[in-house]
Amino acid sequence: MESNRQKKIAGVLQADLANVLQGMLREAGQLGIIISVSKVKVTTDLSIAKVYASVFPAEKANTVTAELNELKSKIKHQIAQLTKHQLRKMPDLHFYNDDSLEYIENIEKAVKGQENPIQNPDILPKRKKT
């Protein structure tokens, strides 16, 4: 259960992260890539913020997420400058690829009959039996 403080910090971080990440893409000349910060979860001790980013086009998602994790100290510094009047301590950032939109798109295709998993079971990811 998230406390109100965690939710407030997550909300502040989400808005500022979205702006900073889009700005970094523009500076790097990476036009044609869109990043949206879909969710931020802050740990109970407020030391870590898990940032879930949706990247479009989806093929670049893993590469972009890896780059964000490499640049997280620079990103953390920029966010700390923006939030210095709202946060006492800036949490460490951990970036994750949020592929839920891609997942939903695949479900829609299956429902519309474009990719039928019954006729073609290879399109479903294999699940390991535990």
Image (tube, rainbow, N blue to C red):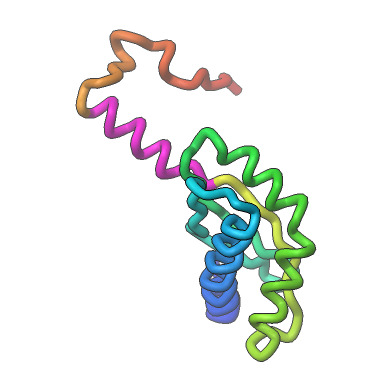
111, above or below 97, in the image: above
**Residue closest to the far bottom:** 85
Q: Quadrant of the N terminus?
A: bottom right
Q: Is residue 74 found inside the magenta-colored segment of the image? A: no
Q: Residue 95, percent across and down? A: 65, 53
Q: Residue 96, percent across and down? A: 62, 49
Instruction: Residue at 73% x, 68% y: name it.
Output: 76
Q: Is residue 5 left or right of residue 80?
A: left
- Main secondary structure of the magenta stretch: helix
Instruction: Residue at 47% x, 40% y: name it.
Output: 57
Instruction: Residue at 30% x, 13% y: name it.
Output: 118
**Residue closest to the far top:** 119
18, above or below 3, in the image: above
Instruction: Residue at 58% x, 81% y: name it.
Output: 5
Q: Quadrant of the C terminus?
A: top right
Q: Is residue 114 left or right of residue 121?
A: left
How many labels were placed on the picture?
Answer: 0
Which of the 4 image quarters holds residue 91? bottom right
Tell me the magenta residue range: 98-111
Asked whether 92 or 69 is in front, the reply is 69
80, above or below 17, in the image: below
Q: Residue 72, percent across and down? A: 74, 59
Q: Residue 127, percent across and down? A: 52, 21
Q: Is residue 24 left or right of residue 70?
A: left
118, above or below 61, in the image: above
